[in-house]
Image (tube, rainbow, N blue to C red):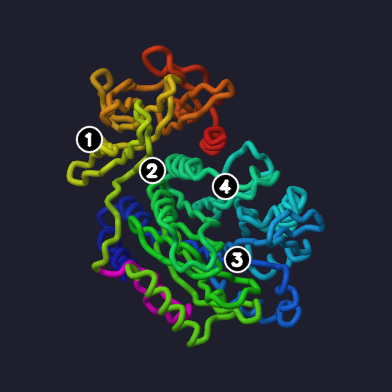
Amino acid sequence: MALYSCFSGLLAFAGHGGLLALGLLTACQAPPKPLRISVVGDVLLDRGVPPALARDSAALRRTTRRLWAGSRYVLGNLECPLTTARQPAAKAFVFRAAPRYAPWLRQLGFTHLSLANNHTLDQHLPGLRETAATLAAAKLGALGYTANAQAGCQPTLLGPDSSVAVFAYSDLHQRLAGESCLCGRDFVALCERVAAYKTLFPGRAVLVYLHWGTEYAEQPGPAQRTQARTLIDCGAAAVVGAHPHVVQTMEFYRGSPILYSLGNFLFDQQGRATDLAVQADFEVAQGHVATTHLRPVQLRRALPYPADEAAKAALAARIQRISPDVQLLPNADTGGWELMPKPGAAHPGSAGPGYFSRQLTLPTPTGARALVRLRYLPRVGYYQALVRTDSAETVLPLGFPVYQFAQGDVDNDGHPDLLVGPIKTTHFDSTRQRRLFVYRLDAGGRLRPRWLGSKVVYRLLYFRVMRGAAGRTYVRTVEQAPNGRYCIGHYSWQGFGLMLDRFAARNVSRDAAYTHFIQ
C-alpha cells in the first residue's frame, strides 16, 4: 500500500516536472531486504555424535533444510578441533574430530563456526591451526580466530556490502599455547574494539557471539548481565551466547536482544534440559536487528529435530519463566516465535547515545576504589559523571555529549586518570567536534580537570589508552585528514598535556585504520 501510494503521488505530480518525479521515485524505492542470520549453539563431532550421524544423517539434513530455509548465513559454535593431531590437553574433557567433517558441515548449510571456546585447543596449537585450515578449505568462516596473535580480535564481515560484523569471544581461560590466537581473555579490549568498529562503521550492525557462563545454569550471573549490556552500550546490535548447554534467560536492553545461551545443537548430552534448544534468526537491516525469531529445537540421541508440540510447550514455558520481561509471539511460518519486549516491562534504555562503556573503577590517591559512571540526561542531551566511594558520592556535571569514556595513567605518575571524549566547541575553536579531556580523581572522590585538549592534529574520531614497549602510557587516536583518509596518532604527556609523538599510520583506508588502531 505504501509503494502504491508513492507511485500514485508520482503519477499525479509528473506533469509538474519529470526530473522531480524521477527524484521522488528514487526516494520511494523500498529499503533493502533484511539480511537473515541464523545462530545455533554448541556443535560436537566427537564421542557419541558420530554413531548418531551414522544411524541417520539424512534426518539431520532434512532438519537443517527446514531450519535454515531463507537464511543467508548460519553460525554455530564448534566444540572440537577438526584435526589429525593427537596431542591431547591435560583436562577433564578432551575432544577431537576428523577433518572430513568440515566439508560435510558446509554441505549441511553452516557458513561460519566459532573457534573462540574452551575446546578448540584440546589438541594444542597444531590441532587449532589444522582446524582453521580445514575450515578454510571447506569454505567455512572461522569466527574468533586469527593466525597472527598480535592482530587482536578481528570481526568477520557478512553480507554483500559487509553490512554485518560478527565478533566471537571466549570468556573461558585455557592457559595453553595458542590461546592468544583466539579472541578472549580481555573483555575490556573486546568492548573497545566493538566501540571503535561501530564508530568507524556506524551503518553496519555488530553481532557478538560469546562463549561464557556456567554449565546447566538457568540464569546468567550478574557479571554476565553487566557484560552483555556493556556490549550493547558499545554498539552491539545483538548479543548471543553458548557454552551452558541449556537455554538461558533472554532480554532486551536499549531495544537490542540479548540471548545468554541457545543450548546445544549437535551434542550427545542427556538430562538437565540439555535436549531443549533454540535457534535465533536475526533479521538485520540498516545497522540494527529489526526482528528476532526463535525456532524451537529438541535433541534426540544427539541429533537436532524441529521440536514436537510437547517440547515446544516445554521450551516456551521455560523461556517465559526465566525471562519475565519478554514475550513470545507465535509465528506460523517458522513454527516458533518472534521474541519481543513485554509491554509495560521495565526495559533499560536510558544510557544515551554513543558507543562506549558507561562505567569503570578508578583508584583514588589513597588507594581506595571509586566507581565512576556516566548518567545521561535525555532532556538536555548531556551526561553527568557520578563518582561513588565508600564514604561519599560526588557529581561532575559535564554539560556535553560524550563519545568515549576510559582510564589510564596518561602522565605516568602512577595514578590512573579519567579520559573523557566530549563533543563540543571550546573558547579557542567554535567548531563542534570530538575532543579529549583528562581528569584527575582526588582523595575526596572529586574529579579535577588536568587537560582540556582543544583539538588534535586532524579530526578526532576515537581514542584508546595504550601501554608502550618501555612501560609508559600513551594515547592512540583515529583521525581523519582533510583528504578523507585516516591516520593513527600516538600522543604522550609532555609536562602539561598530550602532544603528538608520531603517526603510526597515515593516509590509510577506513578498514586499515581500524586494523592499525586495535593492534
What residue sits right under mark 2 in the picture? 357
Residue 151 location, quadrant = top right
Q: Secondary structure at mark 3?
A: strand
**Neighbour class for label 1 at 10 Å: few (<14), some, many (≥20)?**
some
Examine the rendered structure and indicate whether residue 283 appears above or below residue 309.
above
The residue that label 3 is drawn on is 42
Q: CA distance from mark 1 to mark 3?
A: 46 Å
Real-space Cα separation, disc 2 to disc 1, in angstroms: 20 Å
In this view, the residue in front, 340 or 109, is 340
* Residue on which disc 1 sits: 394
- Does residue 399 appear in the picture of this structure? no
Q: Main secondary structure of the magenta part?
A: strand
Q: Residue at x 52, y 68 (%)?
A: 216
Residue 184 image label: 4
307 vs 404, left or right, is right
Q: Nearer the viewer, residue 262 or 445?
A: 445
Residue 452 magenta-highlighted: no
x and y, in percent, of residue 242 in the image: 54, 62
What secondary structure is marked by label 2?
Answer: loop
The answer for how far apart the CA atoms under marks 3 and 2 are is: 29 Å
**Whole-percent x, y for residue 187 in the image:** 49, 45
Q: Are marks 4 and 1 in contact (CB under 8 Å)?
A: no
Image coordinates of residue 364 in percent, x first then y, are 34, 29
